[in-house]
Amino acid sequence: MLPKLKKFFWTWRGVWVTVPTVTGFVLLLRWLGFLQLFELAAFDQLIRLCPPESLDSRLVIIGITETDIKQLGKATLSDAELAQLLTKIKQQQPRAIGLDIVRDQPEGTGQEQLSQVFQTTPNLLGIKKVIANDSNSSVTASPILEELGQIAGADVILDADGKLRRGFISITSETGDTLPSLGLGLAQLYLEPAGILPEGSPQNPEHLQLGQAVFIPWEAHDGGYIRTDAGGYQMMINYRHSPFKTISLSAVLANQVPADLMRDRIVLIGYTAPSKKDEFLTPYSSILIGNPQTTYGIFIHAQIASQIISAAFGERPLIKTWTEPIEWLWIVLWSFIGATIRWRWRYAGGVAKFSFPSISFTLLAGGSLLGICSLTFLQGWWIPLVPPAIALVGSVIAITSYLAYQAADIRSFFSRYLTDEVVANLLETPDTLSLEMQRQNVTILMSDLRGFSNISERLPPEQVASLLNIYFTVMTDIITQYKGTINDFIGDAILVFFGAPTQQQDDAERAVACAVAMQLAMSTVNDQLKQSGLPKIKMGIGINTGEVVVGNIGSQKRAKWTVIGSPINLASRIESYTVGDQILISEETWKEAGTEHVKIIHEKLVQPKGFHQPIPIYEVGGMGGKYNLYLPEADELIVSLKEEILIEFTVISGKDIGEQRFQGRIFQLSLNGAALRSEIPLEPLTSIQIYFFNPSNSEKTRGDFYARVSESLKTETNNVWLQFTVIAPEIEDLLKNWITANQIRV
C-alpha cells in the first residue's frame, strides 16, 4: 500500500507542489488589493452579459431635460411650478413620489401652495445628503418634509475607479441618525399596500426582511472588495438592462401623458440634463473607449427601488457572495484544475512545450469558469472570476516552468543530446533521477571514421575541427531522431546508447535503423565537405547488445554518467572490423532487432581479444518493417590489370605499424579494393599499409594508403581481396588512371 501511495504522490508531484504555491500567491495578491479593480471589472462584464429584461413598469421617471430648462427660462423650478407638477401627479394616484430635487430654500413664488402640497402628500419623499464629505457637496432637506419625517438619503457610493456599483439601503449620519435611502423609502411605500412591511430576519433580527428578500449588509471583504468602506447598510446594485418609462416635465405640465400612467406606481422626479452634472459611471460605462456612458442620478435611485421591490416579490435575486473560506476553496479548485491539465498532458508536445491537448483543455476550463460564473450570477451569486482564472493560468505556467527547469537540469547532466521523450521518461522515473549504478540491457552503437588520423595529419587543426563539426551535426540530428543517447564524442568516434538511461522495447531495432540512416546520410556529409574544400570521409559502425551497468562513476567533485560492461568493449571490437560504409552487428543485436526485419548481406566469424571462441558478426544491408531503410547495392567496377602492380606492405597490429615489409602483386583493381597475391598468408580482417611502385618512373611511392583483408580468394594460395580504408588524394588519382588504362571488366 505504501509503495503505491508513494508512487501516486510522485506521479502527481507537480500538482501537489503547484496548487498550494499558486493559490497562496493569488490569495496574497488579493489580500494586498492588487486584484480588486480586475474583479470589479469582471463584475461589470457579468452585469453586461445578463440577458435583456423588460422594463419595470412599476416605476415612472419624470425627467427635467435641457429642453425643459430652456422652456422654463431658468435652471430651477419655482415653488409654484413644482406645486403644479406634484398636483398633476397626485391626480393619477401613484403609490409613492420621490423628489430627487433640492428644495431647502424657497424658489420664486408659490411657497404657500407648495407647502400645502407637501403637507397633504404623505407618500412624497424628499432628499438630503446624510454623509457630508465636504461643504460643497452638502444637500439639505426641505424643512417641511423633514418635519413631516418624509426625508430619505440621496447619498451614493463610488468605487476607486469612479463607478457606482453599490447602493445604500439605509444611511447613518455622524450623529447616529439613520435614514432610509430614497430607493428603500419609495419601495416601502410601494410594498405597504401589498401587506409587505419591514421586519427583522429570523436568522438575524438586525437584517432587514421585506417579503421574500433578506437584505444582508455588505461587508468590507465581500465579493471582489478588499477593505472597502462598508459603512451604513449597503447592497450591490443588480442593474437592469432596460431603462425605465421616462417622460419629460413639459409633457406632464402640458397634460400630454395618459391619465393612468402613474396610477399605483412609483414616480421619481429629477434632472436628466447634462448641465446639472448629476451623472455617474456604472458597470455599463466603458472607461477604455472614448467618452464613457453615464447614468443620471435619478435612474440610480430607480434601480435601487426596482431591485428592492423585485427581490421582495421573489422576481429578481439580490447579489450575494460566498464566505471567504469557500472562496479560497474555489480558487484552490481552479488551481488544481489548471495544474492537473498541464501535468496530465505535460509531455504530449515535448518537454516544457504547450501541446494541443493542454492548450485545448486549458481554454475549455477557462470557458467553463466564465460560464459557471455567468450562470451563477444570473441566480444572484457573485463568485470570484479573476482570482480562479489567474490560479488556472498560473498553475499551467508554473507547471511549464517546472518542466523547463527539470528538463534543463537533466539536459545539463546529459549534455544536449537527449530527446524530449528521453527527458520525459527520466522525469517520470524517480529511480533514474538518482542516477545510481544499476543493471540494464542496452544496445551500444559505436561509429568511427576510417583513416581519420591520416586525414588530421594532412589538414590544419581548424579544418579538422570544421570537418568534425559538419560530420557530428548531421549524425547528432539522426541519432536524436531515433531516440539514441549520445554518451560521448571520442575523437572522431561517437558512442551512442539505446536503452540507457531509459529502456524501450525497440531499442535494438532503433539502433540498427539509426545506423543505416547514418550511413545513408554520409552522402550529405561528403557533399558539405566538398563545398568546404574538405576531403571525403567514410564511416564504419559496430553495434552490440548486452547487459551493462548504467549510472554515475567518479567522485563527488567530478563524475560522469556512463555505461560500463564487456558489451561496450565488444561493440568497439566489432566496429574495428568495419571498413568504410559498413555496418556490423553482433548476433545478440540481430536477435533483439528482429531477424525478419534486418537485412543481412554477409556473415563472418571473428575472434575478438578476450574471447576463447570465434563469434559471428553480421553485415547489415538495411532495415525493413516500419523503417524501410536500405543501403545502396554497389555496382563496383573491377578491372583485371594487363600488368600486375608490384607493392610492398607492412602488417598493422592494433595501432602499431610493423617494421618488416612484404611483397605482393595487385592483379585486379577497383576504386574501393583490390585482389592481392601476397608472399605471406593474410588472415581476413588483417590491416596493412601499402607501398607501391609508380609505373611511370619505377620509383617506390609511399602514401596514405591503407587496406583491410576482407576475404581469401580461392583462386590461389595467399590470394586475398583488400578493402581500401584510407586513400590519399594523389594515390586515388593513380588508381583511377590504372583502372582507365585497363578497362576489362570482371
Image (cartoon, helix red, strand yellow):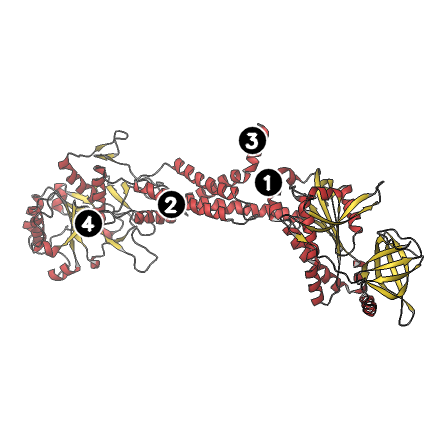
Q: Is residue 246 left or right of residue 557?
A: left
Q: CA gap, disc 1 to disc 4?
A: 63 Å
Q: Mark 2, mark 4: which one is toward the viewer?
A: 2
Residue, disc 3? 5
Residue contact between numbered discs 3 and 4, judged by CB atoms under 8 Å: no
Mark closer to the chain start, 2 or 4? 4
In the image, what residue type sits under mark 1?
Glu
Q: Is residue 470 left or right of residue 740?
A: left
CA neighbours of label 4 inside 10 A, class few (<14), some (14 to 19), many (20+): some
Residue drawn at the location 29% of the way across and 49% of the way down: 164
Helix, strand or loop at label 4? It is loop
In the image, what residue type sits under mark 4?
Phe
Residue 366 drawn at (x, y percent): 42, 46
Residue drawn at the location 17% of the way across and 39% of the way down: 188
Helix, strand or loop at label 2? It is helix
Residue 561 in sight: no
Give the numbered dot on residue 428. Answer: 1
In the image, what residue type sits under mark 2?
Leu
Q: CA gap, disc 3 to disc 4?
A: 62 Å
In the image, what residue type sits under mark 3?
Leu
Residue 674 drawn at (x, y percent): 84, 60
Q: Mark 1, mark 4: which one is toward the viewer?
A: 1
Q: Name the quarter where the N terminus is drawn.
A: top right
State which quadrant residue 631 falls in: bottom right
Residue, disc 2? 370
Residue contact between numbered discs 2 and 3, judged by CB atoms under 8 Å: no
Q: CA gap, disc 2 to disc 1?
A: 34 Å
Residue, disc 4? 244
